[in-house]
Image: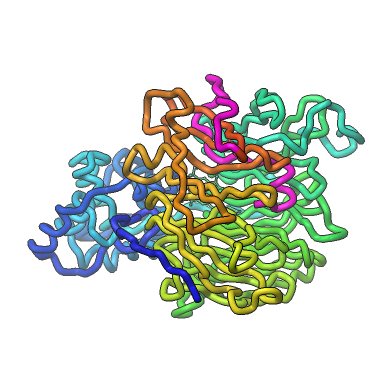
Amino acid sequence: MMVHTFGRHGFWLLAGIVAAALTGPVVADSKTDNLKKHKTTPGQQYKPSLDVLKGVEQPGAKPGVPVLTKAEFTKANKIYFQRCAGCHGVLRKGATGKPLTTKETKELGFDYIKSFINYGSPGGMPNWGTSGALSEAEIDLMSRYLLNEPPIPPEFGMKEMQASWKVIVPPGKRPTKKMNDWDIDNLFSVTLRDAGEIALIDGNTYEIKTIIKTGYAVHISRISASGRYLMVIGRDALINMIDLWMKSPATVASVKIGMEARSVETSKAKGYKDKYAIGGAYWPPQFVIMDGATLKPLKIVSTRGMTVDTQEYHPEPRVAAIVGSHFRPEFVVNVKETGKILMVNYSDLENLKITTINAERFLHDGGLDSTGRYFMVAANARNTIGVIDTKEGKLVKLIREEDGIGTTPHPGRGANFIHPKFGPVWATSHLGDETVALIGTDPIGHPKYAWKVVQSLEAQGGGSLFLKTHPKSKNLWVDSPLNPEAEIASSVAVFDITQPDKPYEVIPIGEMSGISEGVRRVVQGEYNKAGTEIWFSVWNGKDQESAIVVLDDKTRKLKKVIKDKRLVTPTGKFNVFNTREDVY
Ligand code: DHE
């Protein structure tokens, strides 16, 4: 018997993730009135922001189309990229938002576009004007801009990659053994988002050992199979490779794999430890396999191609999560807009074999089950979790909304634990509602429950990004940093996994941090190596105070607040051991 305790409120309309800007070509007053009711929530601002279009040539003007000055064009490019490209695509062919090619925009017309940008839509388009995010003049500019052909950012191939590639310390000049007394297995690599840096923090003493400059709005850290090399990727697609064996760990190699990116991973299969690294780009849509010791780019593969459902060509299918298989010499590469999962076999780069698994469109993030065999991935805008057998290289199941997945699942890498009734489960929380879906992952021991939502817990509210547990813990921690209620955004819900039906406890982490300014969004729990502590970021604005709050996992009580003026906008935290061994 499945247990469902849904009760979704459905107040979450997430433009950053969820679809739907322009719903039809007709301008009607009632529609505009409807639009006027719309309000942007913080969750809707969860969207890509970069500047890929900087310096891109303005396409030639066409008769009947408003002409933009060079300065206007540059400004509009910037706004488009920061506010719109995440949903509508750089080429405006549509992604989670509707297409905005000139075919569509001309039919809609200037006035309609202007009103749409101003008021947003209940379907998910943010109310850029009425929320104050864009001025009237900016909306006017964007409405004209959209009637022009989209500028096309340049490609970024081997020539450009090689030009960006730097080996700062060649492998022969690196230490042959660990030269510092750091406990590197219990080190935390902490994203300092708006500083374009990471902090390496000692998991035993809480000391900030060093701060390392990385790419723009740095996104995630991953660790090589040996635990020696830390790979960090910025949104500008710059990968830094940090050698943790050096007396003072620092970047030993770097490369730019495109103009915008989010994912990096290393080879984990037997016989290939530390041999390769892989980076996945948003623009150009491609992934790159690199030498694991130097980041020398070896093989670039474009992800452009057909969508899994309608089998139509998509010009910019972005690379989302990448995971290194423990079972085969393969990278699991998730392609967002086409919905394909590519099992990229790196045993022979010259005769590269890629198994293409058709999953569901809008793949975003995901992680392995507790055995490391099954990869669970969220197709977030389709309210679906795909299950991939990395051993057999095939799709096991697409678990959908009607099967109990909530609105916009966002697992990070998810959380694995043994449910007292249903056996091993993997969990995801949701951006779009308060539920936490628990999915059975043991087809041998618990076949009745495998790949089913066996229970849906209710946490504090929508706007959740990450949840976490540890094999040694009895707790499941669920964040909600993008919830519109400041109190919910600045606290976490914690469930007792030995009694999942018991109501959760709220831990007011923002308040515990002692910070009084800002929304104090509490984001992404990460365990120490021993599984005795969980660390949360208190993520405030760039000019405000932020912190990391460390809790004792057993007592759920405060253990330490790490504060330092260098901790600018801390978000993701990656414990070296847990990240390397996929403990989550
Ligand atoms: Fe992330 C993981 C993309 C916004 C913090 N983020 C990922 C992954 C992708 C992704 C594809 C999976 C990488 C992997 O596993 O290989 N993120 C995006 C976006 O496109 C999006 C929505 C908009 C953007 O402009 O980037 C976005 N992400 C954010 C944030 O605003 C967050 C909360 C704060 C920040 O630092 O930018 C954020 N994303 C994270 C973190 C992870 C992540 C902490 C890794 C989680 C983990 O436990 O593995």
Q: Image point 47% across, 34% down: which residue?
A: 509
Instruction: Locate residue 8: give its quadrant.
Output: bottom left
Q: Is residue 132 left or right of residue 496?
A: left
Place residue 340 in its image quadrant: bottom right
Query: Is 582 included in the stretch rendered in magenta?
Result: yes
The residue at 59%/26% (across/down) is: 560
Which portion, as a residue range, is magenta? 555-584
Left or right of 420 in this view: 530: right
Quadrant in the rendering for residue 10: bottom left
Total numbered labels placed on residues in the image: 0
| x and y percentages locating residue 456 in the rendered image | 46, 63
User: Residue 457: x, y in percent?
Assistant: 46, 59
Q: Which residue is at the far left?
A: 29
17 vs 173: above or below:
below
Name, please, the residue furthest toward the top: 565
Tell me which colouring the rendered structure shows: rainbow
**Residue at 68% from the left image edge and 69% from the top image edge:** 343
**From where the camera sits, is residue 209 visible?**
yes
Residue at image x 67%, y 67%?
A: 374
Asked whether residue 238 is in view, the answer is: no
Q: Using the image as rendered, state which of residue 228 and residue 499 is in the foreground.
A: 499
Is residue 234 or residue 458 the one in the foreground?
A: 458
In this view, the residue in front, 539 or 91, is 539
Q: Position of residue 434 (x, y in %)?
A: 39, 55
Picture layout, residue 344 above or below residue 397:
above
Residue 494 pos. (x, y %)? 50, 46
Q: Is residue 176 above or below residue 476?
A: above
Closest to the observer, 71 or 447: 447
Magenta region includes residue 17: no
Left or right, 177 with respect to 369, comes to right
